[in-house]
Image: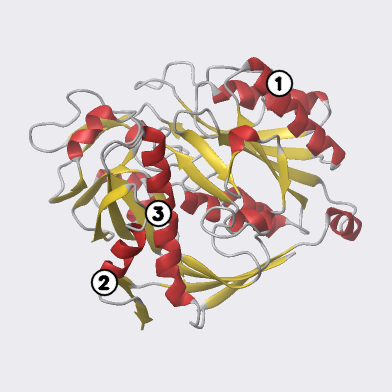
Amino acid sequence: MKLEMGNIFVKDVVLGEENAFEEGILTVNVQGLRDHLLEDHRIGKVNVDLAKPGESVRIIPVKDVIEPRVKVVGEAKEFPGVTSTMATAGKGRSHVFKNAAVVTTGSIVGFQEGVLDMSGPGAAYSPFSKTLNIIVELEPKKGITQHEHEEAARLAGLKAAAYIGECARNLEPDEIETFEMNSNAVEIVKYPDLPKVVYLEMLITQGLLHDTYIYGLDAKQTLPTLLHPNEVLDGAVVSGNCVAACDKITTYQHLNNSVVKELYKRHGKDLVFLGVVLTNENITLQGKLRSCNMATNIAKHLGADGVIVSEEGYGNPDSDLMLNCKLLEEEGVKTVLITDECAGRDGMSQSLTDASPYAKAIISTGNVSHLVTLPPMEKVIGNEKAIEHLAGGYSGSLLPDGSLECELNAILGCTSEIGYHNVTVKEY
C-alpha cells in the first residue's frame, strides 16, 4: 500500500470572501464556511476567528483540532465513513495544509474539554500553540441532547477541515512524503533478521462522550482491529471524545500519529513494522478481558517479537494497559508502554491505578495533576468561565484578574500518550 502526502506549508492565515492559497497565505471564506456548517440543523450559530502563535489569545473550551486536507488521488475521500463514503484509506495522494489547524469550540458538551493559550506559559505545554488556528465557534440549537451536541460539533470540525482543504486540490506541494509498505508476508521475507513490531493503540471508548471512531464506527462496538499504518495517517480514525484535554488524542494527532511515523522511519532498518492494532478501552471486566485477549492473539498470530502499547486517558484505562502488557509478556512478546501519570500535584501519589510486574519498560508523558497558573490573555474565544467545569479546573480556577489556576489536565494535548506533545524529561 502506497500513500503520498503532498505537504503545503502555510505561512499565514487570513479571513476573506473565498478560499485561496497564494505565496504561503491561506485565505478562508468565512461566509462560505458558515453556510456549509449551518446545513446541519442542530447547529444554530457559527463564528469563525483566527488565533496565531504568540498572540495573547485563549480558546476555551476546545473540543477537537483537525488538519485541513483533501484527497486528490484515490477512492477514499477525507475521513471515509464519516464525512464521505466508506472506502479504504491509506492509498493514493492527499494534499495537506501543514502548520494550519481547525479548532472547534463553543458551549461546553462534557466537563472534560480543554484550554489552549497561544502565548505565555500555557503555550509551552500545548503543540497547538504553534499552529495557525482557524477557530470554529459553534452554538447548538436549543433542545438537542449532549450526544447530538457532541456529534454536531465533531462533524462540523471535520467538514470545516475538508472544506478548507479543498483549495489545496490543484496546488503543487512543497514536499511529498511517501509511506509505502507491502504485506507482512513480503516485508518479513525482505528483512528476515529484524525484530517484528506491532503498535497496539488503545482508544478511549467508555461512552458518555468518551468515544473514538474507526471509519465512522463507534469503537465501543468493535473488537481489536488490524489496520495498515497508512490508514491511520489518512483519516480512518477520528476523535469524538471529551476526555481530559491533556491526553485526549485529537483528530489532528491521529492524522500525525507520532508512534506510527517513528516506526515507519525505523522499518527495514532496525525493525519490521507489522501494522497498527486498534483496541478499545472497556468499562466492564468481561469487556477488558475480551479485547485484551484478542489484541494479544492478533499480535501473536502476526509473529510479533515486540509491541508498543499506547494508552488514551488514565484511571480506568490503566487496567486495560496493564492487562495488555501481562497477556503479551506471558506469550513471550516484549512490551513498551506509553502512558501519562496522575501522581498528585506534588508528584508523590501512585501514578497509575493499576500495576503489573511485567510492566518493566514504561515511557511517561507527564504528570496530569501538575498545577499551573496561566496569566490573563487580551482576547478570549469561547468562555473562560468554562475552566471551572473542566477536568483540571475547579470552582475558583478563574481568578479575579483573568488568570487561570488549573492542572495540566485542562491544557489541550500537553501529555499526549502517542507522543505528540511538548512535555519531556531533562537529565541533571
Q: Residues within 10 Å of mark 1 (few under 14, many from 20)?
A: some
Which residue is pictured at 25% across the width and 39% down the height? 142
Residue pictured at 31% horizontal, 49% vertical: 43
Tell me if 295 is positioned left or right of 248 in this view: right
Position of the N terminus, as image quadrant, is: bottom right
* Mark sitting on residue 157: 3
Closer to us: 184 or 105: 105
| Distance between mark 2 and mark 1 Cα atoms | 50 Å
Label 1 SS: helix
Callouts 2 and 1 close, C-beta under 8 Å: no
Q: Residue furthest left?
A: 400
Disc 3 to disc 2, C-alpha distance: 18 Å
Identify which residue is drawn at 53% across, 21% down: 316
- Sequence-wise, the earlier of marks 2 and 1 is 2
Q: What is the number of callouts on the image?
A: 3
Q: Which residue is mark 1?
A: 289
Query: Pointer 2: residues within 10 angstroms few (<14), some, or many (20+)?
Result: some
Helix, strand or loop at label 2? It is strand
Question: Can the viewer see residue 60 in this picture?
Answer: yes
Mark 3 or 1, closer to the camera:
3
The picture places residue 182, in percent across and down from the top left corner, at 81, 62
What whole-number distance in Å separates the C-alpha atoms at marks 3 and 1?
Answer: 34 Å
Q: Could you tell me the amino acid type at mark 1? A: Leu
208 vs 335, left or right, is: left
In front of the other: label 3 or label 2? 3
**In this figure, which residue is indicated by the disc labeled 2?**
14
